[in-house]
Amino acid sequence: MNLTAIHAIYRFEMARWWRTFWQSIVSPVLSTSLYFVVFGAAIGSRMEDIGGVSYGAFIVPGLIMMTMITQAIAVGSFGIYFPKFVGTIYELLSAPVSPMELVVGYVGAAATKAVALGLLILATAALFVPIQIAHPVFMLAFLALTAVTFSLFGFIIGIWADNFERLQLIPMLVVMPLVFLGGAFYSTDMLPPFWRAVSHFNPVLYLVSGFRWSFYEHADVAVGFSLAAIGAFLAACLVAIWVIFRTGWRIKK
Amino acid sequence: MQPIISVRNLTKTYRNGFDALKGVDLDIMEGEILALLGPNGAGKTTLISIVCGIVNASGGSVTVGGHDIARDWRAARSLIGLVPQEMHVDAFETVWASVSFSRGLFGKKRDDAKVEQVLSDLSLHDKRNEKIINLSGGMKRRVMIAKALVHEPRILFLDEPTAGVDVELRKSMWELIRRLNRSGVTIILTTHYIEEAEEIAERVGVINHGELVLVEAKEALMRKMGEKVLTVELREPLAAVPATLSRYKLSLGGDGTTLAYSYDVNAGRTGISALLSDLRSEGIAMRDISTRQNSLEQIFVNLVRRDAQKEAAQ
């Protein structure tokens, strides 16, 4: 096990994050905070409470999930796509580093960033709306699992993408709609029965629901389902990455 | 002496069906400078990329320091530093961050003194806090060399180290390569500049169409393939080569003031003394005599041409 290499990759990636402080830390926190201001403070006062929770507070867990998912994918995919794009991947491939060590380094850094962002947004939200966390341990577990899973998903996209358009394709056309329709802004109880049923095919719903439950004990689906869903997605990503490295797909000629 | 790198029957067929390597065998000795010479697309970079772990071989085997590159890849790769042909750098990182990252990646403990020393050796020390994007092309290449050397490899691969580099820089690159070699690093470089191989290599391998056409010590190669040309400068110009000298296949040049005679150094009789005495008996006065050995370039061109002829004959 080349722990030194994992550490080197992790540090290198974290340094990049700090160097782009405004773009990668301040900007996502600010844009998410705008939702709290607009939907929470301004519009939220005209909305009914959902399950006994004020609308402004209700949307916080979903918004955190939304930002974490998009950021984890963006950072996770860019981290490995960029060396491919500029050619410095030669060094990663010629180094005595196993594929799994690469994954731990890159995905670990991306997940760390996602969790840090999630907590930062949570702290910011607390300034605008009243927050309560019923199950802090579950809250952190959901946070960490989501960060790791989607960073890994991003990593896979980064390996798959062979140009910048493809790098954006899945995040913009698949993930973004799923996240928006994943119940971040509403409870599925508010939907007509047909669309409520359709919603249950959206994997993000399970994440948002479980995460929100850890705050307010209000869930659209049972918490067990939520944990199972994220566990299954994580397992799927792990299998995919294993296959990719076994075959050298899109990495080695 | 044990070879530090052993390549056996190495083949590579790319997905598009292109046979880049067709069964290459090669032993590289510890401490030598080996130049792999060949035209573009001959398979030089593929060979290097397989040894370094960037490209998977289709068949055959490679050992580095006795470690098989497939089974024992970690040990094998630790011994190697690679400087690729294209300029691949972390543009937005500082020289220091990029170079010390490479050390960590190869599993070596952080050692700032070592990084300092490598940067000084490559005259990059005063640029260490500079972002790589701000450096000149020559400096960027030196950063890539620093990254390859900072984990203290025993073998250094340089893929076309002086492609597109000006004369001054090329000379300093050669000096650097010699210096590294003196410190005990085995060096394998690819080039399509013959003069480069001639200048710094101890052995030369010629690759063409995915095959290693030959590997020889440079001197032996030049001697073996060595056609020499004797040029005689004449006192008075000649209108034509006298018929009595026709058996020497002389060519008249310089408006009739020089006679050139090609001969094989390895032949039992080179025919030089006979030619000179025949010239004298013809009453042709000589001003000066010089001989010139074939350059590697000519040898190389001959080899590649012979290869092409063989192919055409098949």
Image (cartoon, helix red, strand yellow):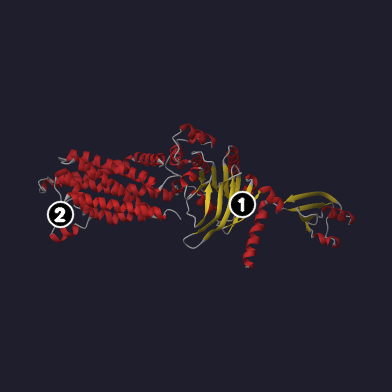
Taking the spot 17% from the left edge, 41% from the top edge, the residue there is: A135
Between B133 and A166, the one nearer to me in the picture: A166
Q: Is residue A117 left or right of residue B258?
A: left
Q: Tell me residue B18's x, y (percent).
A: 51, 61
Q: Chain of mark 2?
A: A
As rendered, which of A64 and A214 lies closer to the eye? A214
Residue A177: x percent and y percent? 24, 55
Q: Residues within 10 Å of mark 2 (few under 14, many from 20)?
A: many
> Alpha carbon of mark 2 to alpha carbon of mark 1: how far?
71 Å
Which residue was labeled with disc 1? B205
The residue marked by circle 1 belongs to what chain? B
Query: Does residue B224 sit above or below A215 in this rendering?
Result: below
- Amino acid beneath label 2: Thr
Residue at which label 2 appears: A188
Q: Residue at x 15, y 58 (%)?
A: A196
Label 1, secondary structure: give it: strand
Nearer the observer: mark 2 or 1; the answer is 1
Image height check: is B309 above or below A13? Answer: below
The answer, for residue B163, to whether it is visible in the render is no
**Image spot of residue A89 (x, y percent):** 44, 48
Q: Total of numbered circles in the picture? A: 2
